[in-house]
Amino acid sequence: MKMIVSIINRDDLGRLTDALMRHGYRATTIGTTGGFLRQGNATLLVGTEDEKVDDALEVIHSNCRTRTEYVYPPPAFVGLEENMPSPVEVQVGGAVIFVLNIDRMERY
Ligand code: 2BA
């Protein structure tokens, strides 16, 4: 069994969750915040059998869009001498995905 951990844009959450349910997957959503942009994103947990992982990834892939955002770099990235930092272009998502091995799952 695997746990698919997907970090996605909040705007894609409803569509992706609907699509996962339609394809027979169970999912849990956590509201999260990106360390770099410090903006809200969403993390989706999908536990599924090994042989279904590729199909689940395809559902995620086809429901998450890559976005270009212009942001002021976080303070940690700006030199002290720079008073007015310029916005930088950042490509965010569609989805950042980790697939983890699960030793055991129980549901009582
Ligand atoms: P954030 O950390 O807010 O990052 C948003 C986007 O900013 C990233 O998009 C990337 O394009 C850029 N970025 C992040 N760190 C950067 C850095 N040190 N220098 C320059 N640009 C940087 P994605 O790579 O698509 O990541 C989207 C979100 O996925 C991230 O939001 C974070 O919440 C999560 N994420 C990405 N990689 C991760 C990792 N290795 N571990 C945990 N979470 C991760």
Image (cartoon, helix red, strand yellow):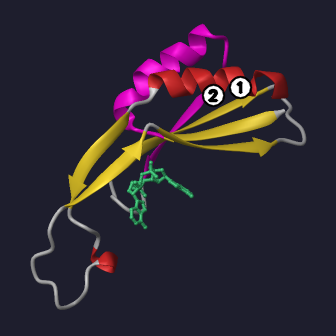
Q: Label 2 crowding class (10 Å Cα cut-off): few <14, some 14-19, many 20+?
A: some
Q: Which mark is residue 91?
A: none
**Residue furthest to the bottom:** 81
Is 45 placed left or right of 19 in the picture?
A: right
Q: At 15% from the left edge and 74% from the top edge, which residue is drawn? A: 85
Task: Confirm whether residue 26 shows in the render.
Answer: no
Quadrant that contains the N terminus: top right
Q: At 63% from the left edge and 28% from the top edge, which residue is drawn? A: 57
Whether label 2 lies within 8 Å of ligand 1 gets the answer no
| Magenta stretch contains residue 76 | no
| Magenta stretch contains residue 23 | yes
Q: Nearer the viewer, residue 30 or 70?
A: 70
Q: Position of residue 59 (x, y in %)?
A: 57, 20
Q: At 38% from the left edge and 46% from the top edge, which residue is drawn? A: 92
Q: Label 1 crowding class (10 Å Cα cut-off): few <14, some 14-19, many 20+?
A: few
Q: Which mark is residue 54?
A: 1
Q: Position of residue 74 (x, y in %)?
A: 29, 70
- Residues drawn in magenta: 8-33
Number of on-image labels: 2
Badge 2 amino acid: Leu
Q: Which mark is residue 57?
A: 2
**Residue furthest to the right:** 103
Q: Nearer the viewer, residue 10 or 62?
A: 62
Q: Which secondary structure lies at badge 1?
A: helix
Q: Position of residue 67 (x, y in %)?
A: 32, 39
Quadrant that contains the C terminus: top right
Q: Position of residue 93 (x, y in %)?
A: 43, 42
Q: Is residue 67 above or below residue 40?
A: above
